[in-house]
Amino acid sequence: MTYKDAQSFWENYLTLIRGSGHRGKIHNPLKNIPTEENNPNHLSAEQLFQKERAALEFSSFWEDKPTETAGNILINALSMTNLSDTDRKALSKILADASLHTDYSRYKQNISRNTGGWKNAADIPDNPFEPIFDNIGNMVWTPRQIYDYLDASVYGQEEAKRAASMLVYHHYHKHRRNLIMSGPSGCGKTEIWRTLAKKFHYIKIVNGPQIACDGWKGSYHIKDIFMEESHGRASHLIIVIDEADKLFEPAISSNGIDFARKIQNELLKIMDGDTLTFTDDDGKKPSCTVSCQNVSVVFCGSFEHMNNRQSEASRHIGFLSGDVTSPTISHSEEDFMEYGNIRQEIMGRINQIVTLQPLTAADFLSIMNSPASPIEKIGIAHNVVLQVDEATRQHLAEEAARSGLGCRYIRSRLQAMLDEQMFQEPDRTGYTLSLSQEERTEEHAGLRD
């Protein structure tokens, strides 16, 4: 959503709670969207559609209820908003400053009076239910703007960022798409979707290897992806399955059942857009019926075993020689079916395959000098200023490329260096992180071994 729309929402609801009380009931915005039959402002069909989409996004604050109190709406909105540690501290300081000038005891006698409030969302001044559209109904987030947002946080991988941007754009317009992102560990596959999930709340990232077949008690199932969400959000998810290659790997039971195939059967129903009814094995949650007509699926993985199997097969028939397990190889649909254990029916519903390239030491050095730098992110998270000398940056970049761990290696190494200093002096506002020549040599030897 735009800054102006977000500010309008928070101002309206803070004003509402302060003026009319947190118990005031407000209708779900989906109840009040205009239709072709009831269109007093004579909006175009596209504008009507866009208003419906905007209302759908905000309706998640109501958790599928027809009405909700202003207080609960605000709490739900806060719980869904990504606040950094710095943001929380700043917000806490604002409220603490205001608290010093407030006599809370005076509200005790008036609390029973604050039971009113607007009964209709349209009655709120400057209706806030247009989060990502301008004043003439045009979508604010174009594919290029989604890409630019990604580009500010994720280094390189232009093709993958473009593919993700187009998927989000089409998904928002009810054109679901399915995508495979293949690339080595640390190249940025998951980071692309983590970054997008901060702006688009209907993106849900799940860990592929933890998904078990339906019926296995105590495990995480496909149905849990949906049952954890409100009905409105569940039926409009972009499901990003991380490490999906491990989910597809054969898992044969003692009686010869391939559980990977069974899980693919469940995924196929989602990709077909079926209406599914899920029930909780323990009976602790009510059954959930979800239409998957507007659900998109993204499979992310290194597909390392597939690369190895394909290379081995190529060597056996004499096409290749030597070690050719390059993670940059591009794959066809046939490769994923023959060597990746993905069913033909699944591949037939994949709209695009994107191969991400491994990042080099030069890439990681550029990342550390960019706005997406893990140095900056760690500093912001701890509200401190970090300085890292060039020799240490170069060493971390080389080891990140050599280890195959990518930015995860850089982040964990920087955090360990910072923790060591913070243990002795936790109250400093700035730290200089540096590795000596001896430490760099020892680390390099350790990773090489």
Image (cartoon, rainbow, N blue to C red):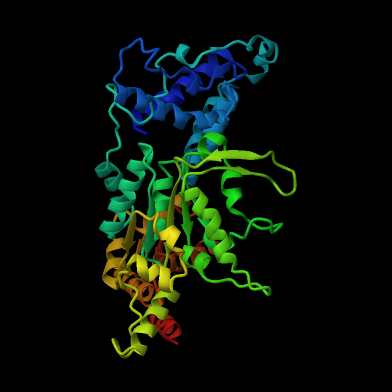
Quarter location, residue 217: bottom right
Q: Which one is nearer the viewer's eye here, 98 or 75?
A: 75
Q: Is residue 430 visible?
A: no
Answer with the quarter of the image where residue 318 lies: bottom left
Image-based side of 215 in relation to 292, left or right: right
Name the residue at 37% across, 38% down: 172
Give the percent coordinates (x, y) of residue 382.
47, 52
- Horizontal and vertical percent for residue 361? 30, 72
The quarter of the picture where the C terminus appears is: bottom left
Percent position (x, y) of residue 416?
49, 67
Q: Is residue 185 above or below residue 100?
A: below
Residue 374 in view here: yes
Residue situated in front as seen by the camera: 434 or 159:
159
Residue 7 to residue 200: above or below: above
Q: Quadrant of residue 136?
A: top left
At 33% from the left and 42% from the top, the residue drawn is 170
Does residue 117 appear to the left or right of 304 in the view shown?
A: right
254 left or right of 363?
A: right
Q: Residue at x 30, y 47 (%)?
A: 166
Residue visible at 37% across and 78% down? 402
- In the image, residue 315 lies at what x, y percent? 34, 88
**Foreground residue among 417 and 144:** 144
Viewport quadrant of the N terminus: top left
Q: Name the foreground residue: 225 vs 111.
A: 225
